[in-house]
Amino acid sequence: MNRKYRKTLIAGNWKMNKTPSETKEFMLAFKGLIPKGRWCDIALCVPAVCIPAAVRVMRETRVGIGAENCNANPSGAYTGEISTDMLVDAGCKYVIIGHSERRAMGETDQDVNQKTKAALAAGLVPIVCCGESLEQRESLVTEEWITMQIKYALEGIEADQVRKSVIAYEPIWAIGTGRTATPEQAEYGSKISRATTILYGGSMNDKNAEELLAQPDIDGGLIGGASLVPEKFLKIIEAANQDA
Ligand code: PGA
């Protein structure tokens, strides 16, 4: 972490887990655990139907609620989709864009770029995901691949807007596998990370967070499985509050 130049952010990605009732239960339990004092930024990105319950409980706390996806169009005939203005009106501060699980469902680099622009225009903080497959890592093309994904995602976006965005580097082979990148692998290039907050994601948990977050160019985490249990998520936040 490098708090001098960039914000520290610990963000949960619930994926397709928890109902609105379970969300309320989690938020009440988690709210009771958050100690007072100087804390990093905290986000919980939850399924769309859980956003109202999460926002209601977390109002007046420093936990920002986020969505896991958005549509880039302002409104119209897009059955089942949710616009960035709708997310803002529902109380969201963040939105995850281009997660590898969504890319696997057909989301393209162009979609990611359009969604990032729409999120920034609406005043949301986009958490833009990138990451290589195991095959790409083994073929030694990781760096080119990630550079290209980020270049596409941020194309046409002004530098001051890029600074408001968050990049999440999530090697696909590390997501939900219990296999984390080494701290050195997880520390994605200082070139883009000088001004933009970079998160690491992929099996980050209460046990390995401290070591991963000790890297100067990892400014936080995007956490799946371990964000579903209040005590585990809290431990990761505590690890982010170590002196950097
Ligand atoms: P994981 O998921 O922490 O369960 O590996 C991370 C993510 O996909 O964002």
Image (cartoon, rainbow, N blue to C red):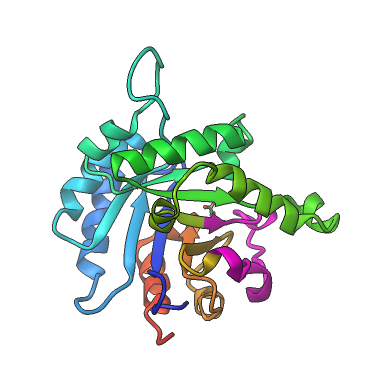
Q: On the image, which quarter does residue 117 sit in?
A: top left
Residue at image location 24% in from the left, 70% down from the top = 34
Q: On the image, which quarter does residue 178 sit in?
A: bottom right
Report the side of 152 relative to 185 (left or right): left
* Mark count: 0
Point out the quarter of the image occupied by ligand 1. Answer: bottom right
Magenta part of the protein: which range?
168-192
Residue reaching furthest to the top: 77
Residue reaching furthest to the right: 139
Residue at image location 81% in from the left, 50% down from the top = 135
Does residue 187 show up magenta in the picture?
A: yes
Query: Residue 147's x, y, as percent?
Result: 66, 54
Query: Residue 84's x, y, as percent?
Result: 33, 34
- Specify the quadrant that holds the C terminus: bottom left
Residue at image location 40% in from the left, 84% down from the top = 242
Query: Residue 58's x, y, as percent?
Result: 20, 54
Q: Is residue 153 above or below residue 224?
A: above
Q: Is residue 154 above or below residue 219?
A: above
Query: Residue 183's x, y, as percent?
Result: 63, 75
Nearer to me, 105 or 6 = 6
Q: Decide if residue 132 is in sight here.
A: no
Report the side of 140 relative to 218 (left or right): right
Q: On the image, which quarter does residue 163 sit in?
A: bottom left
Nearer to me, 3 or 214 = 3
Q: Is residue 119 above or below residue 12?
A: above
Residue at image location 86% in from the left, 54% down from the top = 139
Residue reaching furthest to the left: 60
Report the side of 89 relative to 79 (left or right): left
Q: Is residue 215 above or below residue 108?
A: below
Does residue 18 show up magenta in the picture?
A: no
Q: Decide if residue 109 is in sight here.
A: yes
